[in-house]
Image (tube, rainbow, N blue to C red):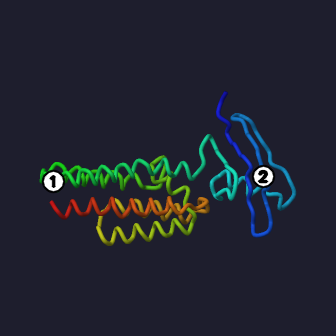
Amino acid sequence: MSLPAVEIRDLVMRYGEVTAVDALTLTVEAGTVTAILGPNGAGKTTTIETCEGFRRPQSGAVRVLGSDPITDARIGLAGPVWGLGAAVASWLTYLATGAPIWLAITELTGFINLFNLIPIWQLDGSRGFHALSRQERWIVLAVIGVALWLTGVGVLWLVAGVALFRTLQGEAGPGHQPTLLTFAGLVLALSWFARHVVTQS
């Protein structure tokens, strides 16, 4: 049996005292066409926006092609998190041995993983950025600006440019503070490694 295209389980969405979606359960099989009909205020747009990742479920679960935006962000940022771990390990190895190759590995690891944070296409940064609300995206842009000012790492211009373009577009994610903190922390730490290595050589 194929994976459902959309799977909604007990979705609840409220606006203040108004319950727009009340324990909705719906499965849309792959290859089918489904219409959501109802009067104004019935929760149609809220449901669709939740499926698209623009809103975060207040209760229940929404999966599109087996994934939700928050889980996808967590999975997407796992690569740069492991990359940061590799940079730390190579930096510590350099400090312990003094071998210049470990310094070069640290710089390259920082650069590659910063490049991977560009929020475009299927790069890991895009998957993380997709979950962020518009306000969280502005915070990430501010952090990128600070990292650029502190380190001067050139690839941050590319990360910032694409992030600004995505922030100014109409779409935004549901918002997720742990993803925001992870993304911002990665930008700062990886740019520090790349810059620190350059200044030490």
User: Residue 13, position in %: x, y?
Assistant: 73, 59
Q: Nearer the viewer, residue 79 or 32?
A: 79
Report whether 140 appears left or right of 36. Answer: left
Three-letter residue code for mark 1: Ala
Q: Give the Cα distance between marks 2 and 1.
A: 57 Å
Say which residue label 1 marks.
96
Report whether 45 appears left or right of 159. Answer: right
Say which residue label 2 marks.
23
Picture residue at 83% right of the left edge, 61% below the top? 41
User: Residue 33, position in %: x, y?
Assistant: 76, 39
Say which element carries label 2.
strand
Which corner quadrant holds the N terminus?
top right
Q: Is residue 196 above or below residue 110?
A: below
Report whether 174 appears left or right of 14. Answer: left
Which corner quadrant holds the C terminus?
bottom left
Say which element carries label 1.
helix
Question: What crowding class fits label 1: few (fewer than 14 Cα within 10 Å), some (14-19), or many (20 or more)?
Answer: few
Q: Is residue 123 above or below residue 163?
A: above
Query: Residue 196's quadrant in the figure?
Result: bottom left
Three-letter residue code for mark 2: Ala
Question: What crowding class fits label 2: few (fewer than 14 Cα within 10 Å), some (14-19), or many (20 or more)?
Answer: some
User: Residue 11, position in %: x, y?
Assistant: 73, 52
